[in-house]
Image (spheres, helix red, strand yellow):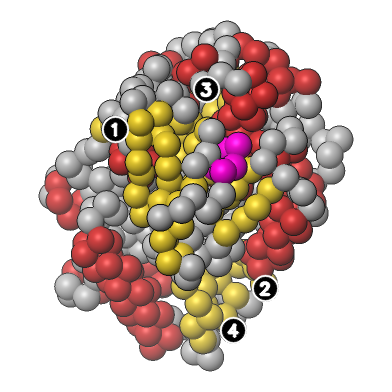
Amino acid sequence: MAIDFQPDVMVCGAGCAGVVAALASARRGVKTLLIERAGFAGGIITTVGLPFFDGIARKSDRKIMQRGIALELLVRSGVCKASDELVYAHNPTIRSIERFKILLDEMMQSEPKLQVLFHSFVAGIETKGDRIDTVVVANKGGLQRFRPKTVVDCTGDGDVAAWSGAPFETWPEYMPMTLHFRIGNVEDNPQLRAKAKDVVVAAHKEGRLKNYYGPGMSFMFAKNELYFHAIRVNGDPLDPEDLTRCEMQGRRDAWTMYELWKEKVPGFENSHYVMSGPYIGIRESRRITGQHVLSENDIKEQRKFADAVATGTWYLDLHPNYATTGSANVKPGALGGMDGFQPDHYDIPYRSLLPKKVSNLLVAGRCHSATRLAQSSSRVNATAMFMGQAAGTAAAMAVEMRKNVQEVDGVKVRAALDQIHAGPFAG
C-alpha cells in the first residue's frame, strides 16, 4: 500500500489537547496533519458536551495561570478579553458548543500548513527500530498510510503510544464514565433540585439506576434548559464491547432520569429531552510511563521544574468506582472520591510528555505520564490544552532542528512558549 502523505507532524486526536497541538505546530510553519474520529474537533467539550475550561485559572483568586491558545479560545468565544488577568470563575464556560465547533473549524482552516481529516482514526502503527515509521488510518477512503517525521498522541487513550511499544499503566477499576445530557422547557423553582435528587435516590434504591452522580444540574445554556452531569457508568473504555455497553447504559439511564423527573418533579411537566452528548465521557484509561512520572507529591509540594511547559490548578479529582469497590465509604451520588487536595498551582514538565522507547513520539492530554491520582488533576480541559500547545511546539521544533523529540531540550520548549506568551506560570 502506497504512502498517502508525509507530514512533518501528525497529531492523532482533535480533542482539547490535539486541536491545540495541531494549531501550535502549524503556526510554527511545519506541515501538520490532524486526524479525528468525530466529524468535528473539540473533544470532551464537543463530543461529550462539557463546556468548562477547567484548569485555566487558580481557584483562590481566579487568576489566569497560563495563556496561549487556550485563552485565545475563551477570548474568541466571548468569555473574557485578551488583556484580562482574572476570569469570572476558576472554571469558566463557553455558552454555545455548536458555535465552539465552528470557531475551531475557522481557526484550523486559517492555517495553510494544517490539513485536517475528520471521521478518521488510527488503525495501526508500523515501527522501525525506536521510531514510528507509518501510521495507518481508517476512514471513508479505506486504509490510508502516513509517514510523519514526528507524531503527537492526543487520543486520550494513548492508542498510538501503546501500539508503538511505549510502556504504559492502566488500573483495574477505572473511574466511571459520564454521559452529559440536556432537558429543555424546564421551569425553575426553589424545590426543583432537591426533589430531582430525591427521585434519583429512590430510583437507585428501587434498582432502576445502578449508579449516579449528584445530580449536577444548571441552567447553563438557556433560562429554561437544564444541563446535567448525573450519569455514572463503570466499565473498560479500552474494551470495544464494554465501551459499547457503557454508551447504551448511559443513554438509558439519562432517559430514565428524564422520565421520572417529568412524572414526579414540579417544573418538569412540560419538559422535553434535548440531547445527550455524541460520546460518553472517559476520565481515565492508559497513562504512559514517560521520562518523568508526574506524582501527587509533585502537585502537593508544588515542585518546580526547569523544563515545565504547562501549569495545573485543578484539585485531585478521583471519582469513586462504587459498583466495583462496593465500599461503605463510597456512596452513589457522591461528587468526590479520594483525596480532593486543592493545589494553588503546579508545574508539568516536558518530560511528562515524552514516552520511553519511542524516539519520535509525544503525548498530550489525559494519557500523559502521571500517577493515577496526579492524573485526576492534570486530565482536565484547559490543562490538556496547555500540554497540547507544548507538544505541538516541541514537535515542530524537532522538525526544524532535524532531531527527535527526545533530543529537544525541554527548557528550550519552555522558552519558545514564553516568547509567544504561552508559557507556564512562573510565579
Residue, disc 4 = 185
Callout 3 amino acid: Val
Residue 147, image x, y percentages: 49, 42
Q: Given contact means CB atoms under 8 Å apart, are the residues at marks 2 and 4 in contact?
A: no
Earlier sequence position, callout 2 versus callout 4: 4
Q: Which mark is residue 165?
A: 1
Q: How far apart are marks 1 and 3 (CA)?
A: 16 Å
Q: Quadrant for residue 329, please give it.
A: top left
The answer to whether 231 appears left or right of 25 in the picture is left
- Mark 3 surroundings within 10 Å by alpha-carbon count, few (fewer than 14), some (14 through 19), many (20 or more): many
Q: How far apart are marks 4 and 1 (CA)?
A: 51 Å
In the rendered view, does 68 fall on the left or right side of 213? Answer: right
Residue type, label 1:
Gly
Image position of 419 with respect to 111: above or below: above
Residue occupying image coordinates x 60% and y 47%:
33
Q: Which sits earlier in the primary sequence, circle 1 or circle 3?
A: 1
Residue for badge 3: 405
Q: Name the residue under label 2.
A: 223
